[in-house]
Image: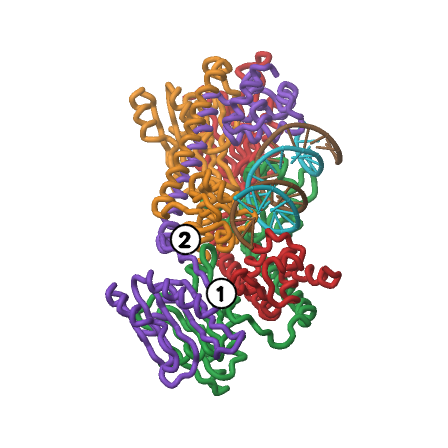
Chain colours: A purple, B orange, C green, D red, E brown, F cyan
Amino acid sequence: MSRNTENLTSVLMRLGLNRYEARAYITLLIRGVATASEVSDLSGIPYTRVYDVLSSLESKGFVVSVPGRPMKFQALDPDIALKNLLEIHREKLMNELHALEENVTKAMEVLSRFKPGAREYESIIRLRGSVSIRNFIHQLIRKCAIRVAEVHPSNIPSVLSDDDLREMKRKGISVAVRVLESMSVNVNLLVVDHSIIIYERGKSDSIGDYDSAIVINSKQISDLLYALVLH
Amino acid sequence: MSRNTENLTSVLMRLGLNRYEARAYITLLIRGVATASEVSDLSGIPYTRVYDVLSSLESKGFVVSVPGRPMKFQALDPDIALKNLLEIHREKLMNELHALEENVTKAMEVLSRFKPGAREYESIIRLRGSVSIRNFIHQLIRKCAIRVAEVHPSNIPSVLSDDDLREMKRKGISVAVRVLESMSVNVNLLVVDHSIIIYERGKSDSIGDYDSAIVINSKQISDLLYALVLH
Amino acid sequence: MSRNTENLTSVLMRLGLNRYEARAYITLLIRGVATASEVSDLSGIPYTRVYDVLSSLESKGFVVSVPGRPMKFQALDPDIALKNLLEIHREKLMNELHALEENVTKAMEVLSRFKPGAREYESIIRLRGSVSIRNFIHQLIRKCAIRVAEVHPSNIPSVLSDDDLREMKRKGISVAVRVLESMSVNVNLLVVDHSIIIYERGKSDSIGDYDSAIVINSKQISDLLYALVLH
Amino acid sequence: MSRNTENLTSVLMRLGLNRYEARAYITLLIRGVATASEVSDLSGIPYTRVYDVLSSLESKGFVVSVPGRPMKFQALDPDIALKNLLEIHREKLMNELHALEENVTKAMEVLSRFKPGAREYESIIRLRGSVSIRNFIHQLIRKCAIRVAEVHPSNIPSVLSDDDLREMKRKGISVAVRVLESMSVNVNLLVVDHSIIIYERGKSDSIGDYDSAIVINSKQISDLLYALVLH
DNA sequence: AATATCATAATACGTGATATG
DNA sequence: CATATCACGTATTATGATATT
């Protein structure tokens, strides 16, 4: 094959033919009509592949087969062949597009339900020692903007100081406090905006029995507990 | 729910994403913003593949990454994202088509010298594929100068379009159409000047069966069949 | 039509065929009997891959080959073929399950020695995935001896099944359920003896979000929450 | 890792864990509670992979994470873990099955249309020379079982001899002959069962101008032409 | 101590060559 | 003269190791 036909080959390959198909088509264009073995000889395609290659070319609309024995093959006019190619591609792409458009529409309906709201990152923190716990709580309360709720048994004081309460009242924050009578646990439950603090006091001043607290940051969970406190 | 996301996955895959990319994208659409490990957890993509998948998604323009340690990833808003996606895909397909068209134009220039005027086809040829067949038929009709006759059963439409008919009327070509009632074969018989086209439709337009046609070029035979159609 | 076969292809792929196998099978279902090259032409499978694909299909029992030159291939009748296929798949899945169950049994024997009686869990743990969470909850309920309390919004069902409730009633366990109306959080709060479970549902049961739960083991805290639920 | 735990690893891998996950789980079973780095040290998993491996194990319901810094991990009881595993698999398989069953039902509706009838192999044969053509025709007529139709112009004799006609009458074969008056073509058109023979006589006895015939075997095409002859 | 990247094996698919009757 | 098989490159997915801040 000359350099010229090599060039042509690559053009046809860019149009979706493989090397064998391109060479077979070029051969038939030059030759007009040829048998399978002539195509093989002239194109360098292994003889044993010529039939299926030509058959594939026929399906793609580049050649027609001439019945007889041996079967012969003839190239379709390049302008018909290339028009076929374009037409087939166009049809395929359009079908694909329409199918996709339908599916995308359906998909959007599904997705619109999930839209923007990511669940915020949910963190659980454990704190030890009354000092750091109280510091943490007061920091939260200072930054608080929406709501505060507290539950504590009657034998344990609130963690909210009078100063805290006044300050929150001033800022227009809703505050709810529930005191559970006739209980003897050493736990305060606090909801501050989207945080829950569960503050468990050590049993006494005995060594090794620190105060400890669990802090959970979660809008959902705090909403539930807040509602529960308010009942 | 599960089926919905399954469905979405396949839609996205048809838009050019692979399975991992599709899942990562869905995850981010639902989540809004997420780190690599969250994406891995939520999507089931192996952690060690998340970064390259997300980076690929980014280079494809479906996701933006927020630098930092850890990196954060964010998908575009689903409403516009999917529409953009579709638009991008449509554009891609169109570009593909245009590139094809350009290549076809280039190819035409080179191939034109293989087309020495009106090509003489062998006296019997076989064509395959509805597009090739229709193109071939319309080319014949364009070149037609004397007569056209068609026979088709009532369950199969004519291959002659209204445009064809008008054009032929204008050129003063005699046109005869015979519709055979109460037949259920998938064959059109066409006589165009000295050619006979026997067009047999397959069952399906994709997998499993194809259209095929036999073209016979013979004045004698076409004369006989034309007379038979006219009876 | 095209879309139908597309659909069929994906169904067959889920039944364990790859794309080529699916297309070859569909082609044979439509065609009845065909040679390798016909299958290639009709299905679009490259000719050089048809034989191994059909042979794979044969070994999977979807196709029979008729020896000879050329070989012929035949699919089973579609009615029974697809049903058989489904049956085979079902069987495969069931075998998989049974194999899994056997392996689980074996694993249990080995693993049992790592389970020194009732395992003590840390005071706070996090669980992920609805199945794990539900299993964990039901285990707690089975071991429960004193009390169960649940809070859930009206839009979310209880995690306690009717069976659970009956069983607890039988054992004389006190049960309290609080439903919070007009709330839309996805959280269940459960107190089982000295454990608190906070169960937060994700948005979807597949890609994009997951269920997670926090379990707190503490007599004090559970006492407080139990009292709060009962108010 | 001892040979014993190696063995256990492979059991867990058969249950769907990868090597890292299996080793991490075993380590946690032995150890009870451990930090990421402890797991790495004891299991041989690269430290940099421990977090994602444990996170994956958590999603699969084999471990729970204990919040804190550093985060700790605890193995779930093997019986819960394995029950989770089974449950998750069972659920997945069942969903898969149900989805498939629906799709198979739909697919069957589509396929039932295509059912058995393959298009018979369509052949086109060209014959040369009056002797072989006449031999071929008479062979066909002898084997004929259903129908015969012929069209010929008045200037050309029928190819059916009186003997042929008598014989066919005896066999109960329907015979239709159309003579086209005032035509001067040298062509006989013959439909014999599912074959079409187009017999074109050479113009004279001049050398190089053989009789030739085209034979097309096709039920569809012969049906159409037969109906056309009968009109 | 975490987060971010690489490397390798199995399979599927497309495509250029060979072997067998 | 056809039909039947091989061989290899690339992409996708799963999974075992390293590198960077």
Q: Where is residue A69 shown, x and y percent of the image?
A: 63, 26
Residue drawn at 37 percent across, 18 percent down: B145
Q: Amino acid at mark 1?
A: Ser
The amino acid sitting under disc 2 is Ile
Q: Quadrant of the N terminus of chain C?
A: top left
* Quarter in which the C terminus of chain C is drawn: bottom left
Q: Is residue A17 visible?
A: yes
Q: Position of residue C104 (x, y in %)?
A: 64, 67
Task: Say whether marks 1 and 2 touch (CB < 8 Å).
Answer: no
Above or below, D17 against A43 in this view is below
Tell me the element at label 1.
Answer: helix
Q: Which residue is mark 1?
A: C130
Query: Any mark on residue B30, and which?
Result: 2
Q: Chain of mark 1?
A: C
Residue D36 in picture, x, y percent from top left: 59, 58
**Circle on res. B42:** none
Answer with the quarter of the image where residue D161 lies.
Answer: top right
Specify whether residue B23 is in view. Answer: no
Does residue B3 sit above or below A55 in this rendering?
Answer: below
Q: Report whether F15 appears left or right of A224.
A: right
